[in-house]
Image (cartoon, rainbow, N blue to C red):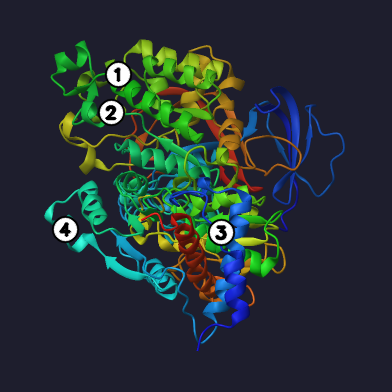
Amino acid sequence: MASPPVAFVNARVIDPDSGYDGPGCVVVAEGVIADVQRTPHLDAGSSEMRVVDCDGAVLAPGLIDARVKSGEPGAEQRETLKSVSRAAAAGGVTSIVLQPDTDPTVDEPAVVDFILRRARDLELVNVHVAGAATRGLEGQRMAEIGLMDEAGAIYFTDADRPIVNSKVMQRVLSYAGAFNALVAHRPADPWLSEGAAATGGELAARLGLPAVPAVAERIMLERDMALVEQTGARFLVDQISTADALESLRRAKDKGLEVSASCSINHLSFNEIDIGDYRTFYRLDPPLRPERDRQALAEAVAEGLIDIIVSAHTPLPAEDKRRPFSEALPGAVGLETLLPALLNLHHDGGYDLVDLLRAVTIAPAQLLGLPGGRIARGAPADLVLVDINAPIVVDLERLHSKSKNSPFEGRRLQGQVLLTMVDGRIVHQRAR
Amino acid sequence: MSPSADLSETIRARLFAFPERHLNSVADLDPPDVTALLDLADAFVELNRQASKKLDLLKGRTLVNLFFENSTRTQSSFELAGKRLGADVVNMSPRTSSVAKGETLVDTAVTLNSMKPDLLVVRHGASGAAALLAQKVGCSVVNAGDGWHEHPTQALLDLLSMRRALGSVSGLTVAICGDVLHSRVARSNVGLLNLMGARVRLVGPPTLMPADADRWGAEVFHDMRDGISGVDVVMMLRLQLERMDGALVPSTREYFRFYGLDAEKLACARPGAKVMHPGPMNRGVEIDSGVADDLSVSLIQDQVEMGVAVRMAVLASLAARLGNER
C-alpha cells in the first residue's frame, strides 16, 4: 500500500474500451490507475514516482480469462492455485475464472469461499470462481446458485459436462434469473459426442478415430437458445467451435437474447490437420475443427459475434496425456500462450489488435461484472506490458504451470510479456 | 343452554341464499356475496366463542366430507362447521377404501349420490375434480381444494382474518410468497383479493412461479425484500419439502435465506403488517418461528378460527338455497 506511485511512460497504450491505440503514459497509485495521458512523456510527474520507460512496448489492460482449470482442490498434481496464478501472471493474465469441476465440486458456498480465500492469500492475480449449475455436475439437481452467488461465484456452469435434461436446464436458467446470474453451457449433444476424439470428416475417418459430427454443437446450441428465449436468462455459450453453430448464435443475438459466446484460443490457432500425427497435446474438447471453421471463428471474433476469447487452460500431466490419442484426456494449458497466440492472429492473420484484445479485456469484464479490463482513471491497476514483436519459442520447461501439455510446444510466436501488474503490484517482470 | 337470543337473531338476519348451487371457485362470487358471507361468518365467530355453539340451521341435512387427499385441518374444520349447524356429518377417505379397489371418481360420485347427501365437501389431488363431481351429483358441492386449482374457503377465511385485523380489505397490498406454482391457495386468494379491491403481489423464485403469473392481476417479484416492501399483509405459502431437493429449489437452507420470512425481511413490510400462513408450516424453511409465533404480527391462529366460521357461513347459505326442494 505504501509503495510509491509508478509511472509507465513512452508506452503504446491500447485500451479496447475507448478504442484508443497510441502513445501514452499511465500513472498508478494505491492500486488504481491515477492518471492516463495520451502523450509519450509525462506532463507533470512527481519526484517520488518510480518511472518505467516502456520504450514503445504495448501497455494494455491485464487479460481476463473466463475459463481456467486448476487442480486445487483435489488434483494438485495437475495444478495448484499458486502454480495457476503464477502461470497467469507470466502470461499477462490478471484475472482468471476457475471452473467448478474440482474435487470437491464447487457446488456450495463453502467451497467458493475456500478457494477465494486461498487464492487471495497468494496475492498474485485476481482469482474468481464459477459455481456448478447442478449438484456434483451431474445434471440432475440444481446447485445452490443463490448462496454461491452471494459467496462470490461469478457465473454458473457444469464446465465440460452438458446438462442433458432439458427440464433441468430450463429450471437452472429460470432460477438463475432471480439473481441475474450468468449461466454458461457447453453446446454438445451428449449422445453424438459420446466417446469422440475428433471432429467428424474425412481426416478422422482416415485416422480411424471416433468422431463427433459438427452438428452436435448446433443441436445443443439451438436447444439452449430456445430455453434462453423462454426464460430470459443471461447466457454464455461456452467455447463455440463450428461455423454452423455461429449461424445459430447470430440468429439468437439478432432476436435480442442476452447471449454471449466464448471461443478458445486453441480453436483460433489450430485446425484438425494438427492432430494428424496423433499428438495428444492437440486432443481437445471440443475437438479441433477444419480450417474453414477456424477462419469463421476468427472472423466472428473480429466482428464481435464471439464476445470473448478464453485460454481454456486445462492442466494435464504426462500420465493423462501420454496415451493413445483417443484415450488421452482432452485439454491444453494456455494461460502463458494466450497473449502470444492472440498476437499471432494479428501478425500473421492480419486481425486488428484492438479487436483481439477487446475479447480478453473489456468484453469479459463487462460480461462478468468485473471492474478491470480498461485503462482509465479509477480503474484497478491491472496491466500488462508486452513487446508484441519480440520473437519467442514456446519452451515447455519454462512454463510456470505444473502441467506442460501445450499444443504450442516448440512454436515460434511473437510477443514477450515484460511486466504484469495486479492492483498496482508487480506480479511478473522479465529482465530486459 | 342455547346461544343468546340476540346472536341467533343476528345470524338469522344475516343468512342469505348462496347465489350458486356449488362453491367451486372464487370466480363464482360477486363482491356483495363475499361481504354477505363474511358478515355471516363474523356472527358465527361470536357463536363459536360461546359455551353453547350449536344451531339447527342444517338440521336434517347430510354433509359428506369426501377427502381424496389427507387433510387434518380442513376436514375437521368442515366437520365441526357441519356439526355446529346441526347436520349429520360423514367423513369419507376414498384413498383408503373404494379408490384403492379401482373405482373412478365418477363411480364414487354416483354411489354417493344414491345416499342422498345435501352437501358434499370435496378435496382431490386433480385440478377440476370438484367441478366434475358437481356435474354428476344432485347436491351442493364445496371445493375444499382441487389440485393446484382452487381452495375457495381458504381464500374466504384469509379474507375474513384480514378484514377483522385491518378493517377494510379494499386498498390493502397483499404479498403472497413462496410456491405459487403449485398453490391452489394462491390462485383462490389472487382471485378473491382482486375481486375485493386489494392489490396483490406474488413473490417467489422463478421456478415456483407460473408462466405469465403477471397476467393474473398481480405483480410478480423474485426478490423477497422488494416484493414485501411496504405491504400490509405477507401471506406465506407452504413449500413441499420434496420440491426443495434441487428440483425446483436448490436446498432448504438456500430457500430460507432468500425466501424464508424472518424478522429481518418482515421489516421491509409496512410497520404493523400482518403475517399469514395456510398451514401446516415448515418452520425454518418458509417461515421463522420467531415470526410465526409473534402474536402481534401473526394471524396464523386466527386463520384456523376463522376457518370454522367461514365454512359454517358457506354451508348455511348453500343449504338456504337448497330450501326444501328435496
Instruction: Using the numbered discs, state the Cα–Cα distance from disc 4 to disc 3 in whole angstroms.
Output: 37 Å
Q: Is residue B293 left or right of residue A206?
A: right
For badge 1, the amino acid type reads Val
Count the labels in the image: 4
For badge 4, the amino acid type reads Ser
Label 4 close to label 2 by CB (< 8 Å): no
Residue carrying label 4: B98
Residue A187 falls in which quadrant of the image?
top left
The quarter in which the N terminus of chain A is drawn is bottom right
Residue carrying label 3: B16
Q: Do labels 1 and 2 share a chain?
A: yes
Residue A47 vertical position relative to residue A293 in the rendered view, above or below = below
Q: Residues within 10 Å of mark 3 (few under 14, many from 20)?
A: many
Instruction: Using the numbered discs, state the Cα–Cα distance from disc 1 to disc 2 in whole angstroms.
Output: 9 Å
Residue at the spot x=38%, y=23% of the render? A222
Could you tell me which secondary element the residue under label 2 belongs to? loop
Residue carrying label 1: A215
Label 1 close to label 2 by CB (< 8 Å): yes
Q: Is residue A87 left or right of residue A43?
A: left
Instruction: Using the numbered discs, state the Cα–Cα distance from disc 3 to disc 1 in whole angstroms.
Output: 69 Å
